[in-house]
Image (spheres, helix red, strand yellow):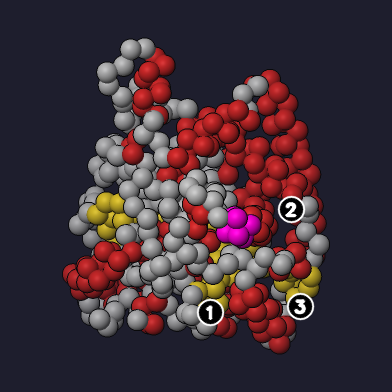
Amino acid sequence: MSNRLYSKTIWELMELLGAREISSQDIHKETQANIRKWEQKVNAFISYCEISGSVNKKGKLSGIPFSVKDNLSTRGVLTTAGSEILKDYIPPFDATVVKKCKAEGGFIIGKTNMDEFGHGFTTETSAFKTTRNPWDLERLPGGSSGGAASAVATGMGFFALATENLDSLRMPAAVCGVVGFKPTYGRCSRYGIIAMASSLECPGVITRNVDDAALIFSFIEGKDEKDANSMNVNTFDISKLESSISSDLKIGYSPAYLGKDIDSEVKAAFKGVVKKLSDNGFEVEEIVIPDPEAEDFMNNIIYRSEVSSNLARYDGIRYGYSAYKIRDLFDQYFNTRSVFGSEVKRQIVTDTLAVEDSEKLGRIYIEVQKLRGEFSKKWNKIFKNVDIMISPASPNLALPVGFGRKSGFIGGVVEKRIAEEGKGYMRLQGMYSVPAVLYGFPAISVPIGLSKNKLPIGLNIFANRFEDEKILDFGNYIEGMVDFKGLLNEF
């Protein structure tokens, strides 16, 4: 299959559609061909729809198909968050980011698979299926947005709306060879997200190139009266996105990012990018970052508090699955929540026990927020010395199917060697992901190459709050520098 249209950016398609050199039907046919070829192999979708919502034929995205992670509400379309407890839930409204894309004429091709309520990093905890990595079907696409990344990589839609909470968007994009962009917290409305940890979660976009990520960001950003955390900032003007970038930019990275648990090919690829940047005149320097263990502790306290609160709403009374043949309220709760997967049950137990003393939790939470503010100041000082920070997007190549269970992170029979690998993996992944999540920094992962076995390797780029344009500019530069060929060019 030629993928004639999927070799182009959305920008280019918009121009071709405007000049009537192609039709939306041409795009639809090629998308359907990709779905027929790939979906049975990779299991990217939980549900599929021909066209969802009215299509604005005058919108800039008119005729462009996209997918939506299944924790973003879609009016009239099944939305499960990867959980059996929501297997019949059909929202009466669209998430704001979904609504904005539909208003521009885009249409939803389907809802993508994810770890149940976002609990996981492999897409293995979904109640419905395990998504595979299209580069190697015996490997995983990362998580929790694994279905979204897999769909975009295989041309099953030109972009995917997804969410980020602890690298759950950037890392899957990286191991699937596509671009994952998480905006500054507050620049895009959170309204309509089925939340895991509300103050850490942010909507974003997965695309096949940086230009497309910038384009979709220009549609979904902005203040929303339905989300008090959304902010009025200078509207993103995509026409001002630079095609080249000044070598006056100072780039920073931490030697801690290249610890002993990193894959040797990932390390070599990252060092190769650092060398190329230096050769091209950029000042690249090693930076001492704030204590990653303290940041992980802060993130865990906030995460556990909010997860415990958010999961408590699934009581069988208000919405979602409701148990029957019950004797009392305890039965109602117990039997309803029995349909949760093992990882979510574990989270409920451990997180609730961790925060069960509300008075003590209140004190800890306040202290953690103070500490969070102090660490944020440390990062502000770093960004006075460098313009951009870079790290590997993931310390590993795509993980083998079954890794989550064998490592003990999602139950199952634990294998000691894999469990140790998992601990090292999570330690480094936390260094790459926590700062952007904890302090609301914008971040993007961009493919930088393939391993010897043709598995994608990604670069993580982040900057200070509201410098989204800067990292998009730089990501665009990196993309041109490495000239990565996506999956549809490889197969």
Q: Would you say 286 lies left or right of 232 here?
A: right
Which sits earlier in the primary sequence, circle 1 or circle 2? 2
Q: Secondary structure at mark 3?
A: strand
Measured in 3D between alpha carbons, the distance from the residue under mark 3 to the one under mark 2, in whole angstroms, is 24 Å
Q: Would you say 80 lies left or right of 249 here?
A: left
Residue 443: image location, x then y, percent: 59, 60
Measured in 3D between alpha carbons, the distance from the residue under mark 3 to the one under mark 1, in whole angstroms, is 27 Å
Question: Which numbered marker is on residue 174?
Answer: none
In which quarter of the view is residue 84 placed? Answer: top left
| Front in this rendered view, residue 370 or 23 | 370
The kind of residue tagged 1 is Ser
The kind of residue tagged 2 is Pro
Which sits earlier in the primary sequence, circle 3 or circle 2? 3
Which residue reaches farthest bottom? Answer: 279
Split into 4 quadrants, where in the image is the N terminus?
Answer: bottom left
Q: Secondary structure at mark 2?
A: helix
Q: Which residue is mark 1?
A: 451
Q: Residues within 10 Å of mark 2 (few under 14, many from 20)?
A: some
Q: Secondary structure at mark 1?
A: loop
| Dominant secondary structure (helix, strand or loop) of the stretch shown in magenta | helix
Q: Which residue is mark 3?
A: 283
Rendered position, 119 above or below 38: above
In which quarter of the view is residue 397 placed? Answer: bottom right
Q: Which residues are magenta?
A: 416-422
